[in-house]
Structure formats: structure tokens, C-alpha cells
Image: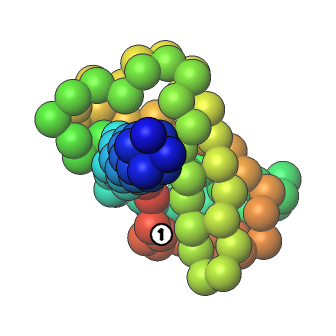
Amino acid sequence: MKSITVFGAVVVVAAASLVSSASGAYAQAAAPKEVSMLCKTALGGRGIIRGYVDLTLSNLGASPIPKGQTMYAQKGKKTIKFKAPAPIPPGGAATFRTSSRAFMSQGECRGWY
């Protein structure tokens, strides 16, 4: 009888281990992936004088970006984030102002959400 109880305990522990490993793998697989966006900075009329530049993030994906989605932009070693003020349709864009020194030159940057 003792060997059956020990065997049963080993089976329960092994099953619990498999279930917890599987749920961990599932949680990792369910993590959202990074979606690239077109990112550009523009000095604009008086932008550099006032201490800001316009940063445009364009949706390159096939689905809309929901309102409030956190989006990121990186230029050099500096990364900044923004919240989408409204849904951004595929092919659409949102423009933000930043005073980050890393973005003070006109050109491309890396964008994602």
C-alpha cells in the first residue's frame, strides 16, 4: 500500500510540474510582438527656436492602433514614448512634439508599439 501512495504522489507532482511548465510557455507565447512604425522628425517653422521638434509615427501595420496604445520612438540611445491620442488606421499617422535633445535633428528614427 505504501508503494502505491508514493507512486501516486510522484505522479501528482510530475503532472503539476508539466502543467506549470506548459502554462509558463503559453504565457510567453501570448506576449505581444513589436510592430514597426515609420518614424520621422521635422524641425518645422520655429520648432528648434522654441525647443521642440515634431515627431511623426506612421502605422505600417494591417490593423488600426487603438487610442491610448503606448508607442515608442528611438534615435541614438534615447527612447521616448507616447500614447496614441486617437485610433490610428493602417497607413495613418500621429504627430507629437518632443523637446528631447536626441531628436533635435531632422530625419528618420526607429518607431514601434
Q: Say above or below: 110 vs 82.
A: below
Quadrant housing residue 73: bottom right
Q: Is residue 12 above or below residue 46?
A: above
Residue placed at 43% from the left, 50% from the top?
A: 3
Picture coordinates of residue 95 (x, y %)? Answer: 52, 39
Q: Nearer the viewer, residue 66 or 3?
A: 3
Given the image, on which type of amino acid does mark 1 rest?
Answer: Cys
Q: Nearer the viewer, residue 101 or 51?
A: 101
Residue at coordinates 58% horizontally, 74% vertically from top-left?
75
Image quadrant assignment for residue 49: bottom right
Residue name at image x 39 percent, y 43 percent = 4
Question: Which residue corresponds to mark 1?
Answer: 109
Residue 107 visible to the viewer = yes
The quarter holding residue 65 reads top left
Q: Give the left or right position of residue 27, taking residue 55 as reference.
A: left
Image quadrant for the N terminus? top left
In percent of width and height, residue 39 lies at 42, 58
Closest to the observer: 87 or 32? 32
Residue at image coords 69%, 73%: 78
Front residue of 98/8: it is 8
* x and y percentages locating residue 44 in the rendered image: 59, 53
